[in-house]
Image (cartoon, rainbow, N blue to C red):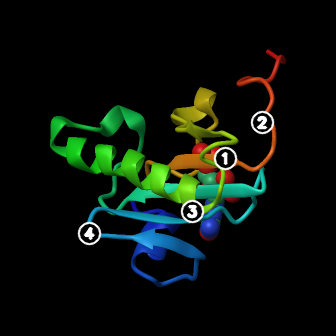
Amino acid sequence: MSTIFAKIIAKEIPADIVYEDDLVLAFRDIAPQAPVHILVIPKKEIPTANDVTEADELTLGRMFTVAAKIAKENNIDESGYRLMVNCNEDGGQEVFHLHMHILGGRKLGPMLSKQG
Ligand code: 5GP
């Protein structure tokens, strides 16, 4: 089942795209939770982290090299940043098209909230 991210890949809805190649697309999150909040997604529709296969390893590796490039371009490579992938309900996943969050530009605090 396609998501809003498939529409962004197809350029059917606008997004602030910061990087694109044959395998991945990166764009600014519509509701940023840090000064830099960019999503890196595979162009292939992979719903969750549970659905990755060996055939996706090149794409998944590309997501990391692109994240490093974007971090440098946004001057957060030295100060630091967080790469995050949420999976399913307990992980807080809202859009069921695999995506890596790049978050930085401020101190992000503890990795998890203390509640629960
Ligand atoms: P998740 O909670 O699934 O890990 O993260 C989904 C992210 O996608 C959220 O941070 C949300 O703000 C972002 N998002 C949802 N819809 C859109 C959209 O239409 N455009 C953009 N740029 N980001 C979106």
Of helix, strand and loop, which one carries label 1?
Answer: strand
Of helix, strand and loop, which one carries label 3?
Answer: helix
Are the two marked residues, 3 and 2, in contact with CB atoms closer than 8 angstroms? Answer: no
Q: Which of 51 and 72 is in front in this view?
A: 72
C-alpha separation, residue under disc 3 versus residue under disc 2? 19 Å
Of helix, strand and loop, which one carries label 2?
Answer: loop
Are the two marked residues, 3 and 1, in contact with CB atoms closer than 8 angstroms? Answer: no
Instruction: Return the residue found at the far right.
Output: 115
First in sequence: mark 1 vs mark 2: 1
C-alpha separation, residue under disc 2 versus residue under disc 4? 31 Å
First in sequence: mark 3 vs mark 4: 4
In the rendered image, the quadrant that contains the C terminus is top right
Q: Residue 108 has which mark?
A: 2
Q: Residues within 10 Å of mark 1 (few under 14, many from 20)?
A: many
Q: Residues within 10 Å of mark 3 (few under 14, many from 20)?
A: few
The answer to which image quadrant residue 64 occupies is top left
Tell me: is circle 3 under 8 Å from ligand 1: no
x and y percentages locating residue 10 in the rendered image: 39, 79
| Amino acid at dot 1 | Leu
First in sequence: mark 1 vs mark 4: 4
Image side of residue 51 versus residue 114, left or right: left
**Residue at which label 3 appears:** 73
Of helix, strand and loop, which one carries label 4?
Answer: loop
| Amino acid at dot 2 | Leu
Q: Which residue is drawn at 60% across and 76% down?
A: 16
1 over 91 or under it: above or below: below
Q: Residue 103 has which mark?
A: 1
C-alpha separation, residue under disc 1 versus residue under disc 4? 24 Å
Are the two marked residues, 1 and 2, in contact with CB atoms closer than 8 angstroms? Answer: yes
Of labels 3 and 1, the one closer to you: 3
Q: Residue 22 has which mark?
A: 4
Of labels 3 and 4, the one closer to you: 3
